Image (cartoon, rainbow, N blue to C red):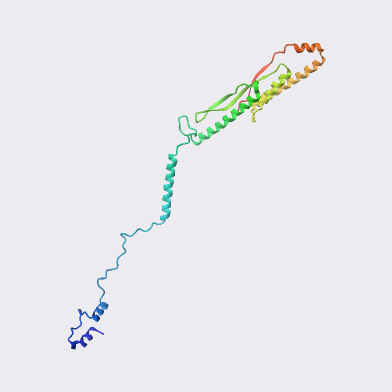
Amino acid sequence: MSISSVAGGYSSYGLSPHGANCQCPACQSLRSQASPVSGTPPSSAPQTANAAPPPAAGGEAGNNAAGQDNRGSAQSASQAAKPADPAAPKSPDGKPLNDAQKQEVEDLRTRDIDVRRHEAAHQAAGGALAGAASFTYQQGPDGKQYAIGGEVPIQISQGGTPQETIRNAQTVRAAALAPSDPSGQDRAVAAEAAQMEQQARMQELQQQSGNRSLSPLQKLQQASAPAGSVQAKGGNIDTYA
């Protein structure tokens, strides 16, 4: 049905013809179908001004890396603020030692302990025949003196009788070999003491052989005679190396 046929069909009733301004339901329906709908706002463009920015690629990894950097910085600051060990060795001017100097100090400490232990063993075994130990020192990077060598003087003396000489020689030999690590000088002193002991034993045998041929009066006179001069020799056991 068209607007013109409707107008022609109802003209005899004196009604106003249908037109552009007709408000009947049919005309309004036709106008709404034929004309584009006005007043419809155009499709809105995406609003990007206030939109939240998309997360950056690897955002979680970046956050983790940033957190690790922050923790690393905090640890570095904590380590820097940590006070130095007061027991750590230092140079005479109070500065910390480097690794090489620390190792040198540790080696000197170990050497000092070994030297003093070594000489103490000599003295303990030498008894009255051994004198006081003397030491050779070296200054370490920390300014302290460490013993790196030492020696103990000992009296290698012959006694008034072969038996006494034998006892002295045995004491000297035991003192020379007392440490667990005797030096070359220690072994030389021990060999000298062993030789002195052998000579004293030969003298003892000679005396025993001669006494058998003496009369009781001669034996009494020999026993009451003053002892001969005692020969004494001094020697040092050990130059620690």
72 displayed left or right of 45: right
Q: Residue at the spot x=23%, y=83% of the render?
A: 3
Q: Quarter of the image for the C terminus: give it.
A: top right
Number of numbered markers: 0
Task: Look at the picture and state if 19 lies above or below 219.
Answer: below
Residue 196 in which image quadrant: top right
Task: Look at the picture and state if 71 lies above or below 194.
Answer: below
Task: Look at the picture and state if 196 lies above or below 66.
Answer: above
Q: Position of residue 44 (x, y in %)?
A: 29, 66
Residue 199 in which image quadrant: top right
Query: Can residue 148 be seen by looking at this rendering?
Result: yes
Q: Residue at the spot x=61%, y=28% of the render?
A: 118
Q: Position of residue 185 (x, y in %)?
A: 64, 25
Residue furthest to the left: 14
175 displayed left or right of 35: right
Q: Nearer the viewer, residue 131 or 28?
A: 28
Q: Position of residue 203 (x, y in %)?
A: 75, 18
Task: Look at the picture and state if 149 lies above or below 203.
Answer: below
Query: Can residue 241 be seen by looking at this rendering?
Result: no
223 displayed left or right of 39: right
Q: Nearer the viewer, residue 51 or 196?
A: 51
Q: Residue at the spot x=43%, y=54% of the render?
A: 61
Q: Quarter of the image for the N terminus: give it.
A: bottom left
Q: Position of residue 97 (x, y in %)?
A: 48, 34
Q: Residue at the spot x=42%, y=45% of the render?
A: 74
